[in-house]
Each structure stands twice: as C-alpha cells, then as structure tokens.
Image (cartoon, rainbow, N blue to C red):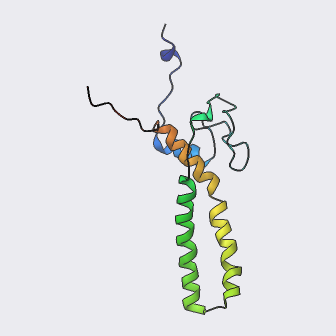
Amino acid sequence: MNDTASNPQPETTVLQSAMRGLACKCPRCGQGKLYAGFLTLAPACDRCGLDYAFIDTGDGPAIFIIMLAGGIVVACALIVEVKYQPPYWLHAVLWLPLILATTLLPLRAMKSLLIALQFHHKAAPGRLVDRSK
C-alpha cells in the first residue's frame, strides 16, 4: 500500500508559509518553535523534527529592516525638523527610541518570514551547470 496515499501532506500556499513565518513557527508544520533565543535558531522543530540546518538567511532580514526603519525615521525627523525646528538634543531623545523600536522589534519576525519563504520555495545554493557535454 502507498504510504503517501494514507498520509497526504497538503501543499501549503505562500500566504500560509508567510503566516507561519510571521508567527515564528516551524515552516513545515506551523506548530513547533523556530527560535531557542531572541535570534538563535533551535536545532530542530520540537513537533515534526525538521532539522533547521538548511536555514541561511544571511543579512537579508537586517537589510529589509534597515531600509524600512530608515525611511520611517528619516521621514519623521524631516517633518519634525521642518515644522518645529527643535534643538539637536531633542532630536536624539525623539529618534533614538524610535530607531531601536523599528529595528529590534520586527527583526525576529522578518528573519522567520524569510526562513519560511526559503523553505516554501525550496531555496538552495546556486550550482554551476556543466554545459560542455
């Protein structure tokens, strides 16, 4: 008897994979924890046993967050500067907490989102193709 017919794995959509990523859950089962610490990955899923050794997000999450946070903070700082012209110390008081909030808070979710999308699309390192044959 065919094992795949008795226990079919439904194909997940990109939206389901993205929601699993934003929830910081296992990209395969959507239930196990992805992280052992703030940004430290667990070795494997505690529910389905998926080995997380394949995960390599690199600097991708940080770049996305830097671009988004930079746009938000710079736009807010320019609006406040043009409208109110506060002293520089007030700029530091206003924007340093906003920079920390817009970079550190979404970083974990962005990293797990990229992990889930990497798993969904079966991303792998590039390979050279031998075309001499």
Residue 118, percent from left and from top:
50, 41
Looking at the image, which is closer to me, 39 or 3? 39
The residue lying furthest to the left in this view is: 133
In the rendered image of this protein, does residue 120 appear above or below residue 58?
A: above
Q: Is residue 27 visible?
A: yes
Looking at the image, which is closer to me, 41 or 79? 41
Q: Is 59 left, or right, of 92 in this rendering? A: left
Q: Quadrant of the C terminus?
A: top left
Q: Is residue 16 visible?
A: no
Residue 112, percent from left and from top:
59, 47
Residue 9, percent from left and from top:
51, 26
Residue 38, percent from left and from top:
71, 50
Looking at the image, which is closer to me, 5 or 100? 100
In the rendered image of this protein, does residue 60 appear above or below residue 17?
A: below
In the rendered image of this protein, does residue 67 appear above or below residue 35?
A: below
In the rendered image of this protein, does residue 20 appear above or below residue 99?
A: above
Q: Residue at x 58, y 43 (%)?
A: 20
Q: Residue at x 56, y 64 (%)?
A: 66
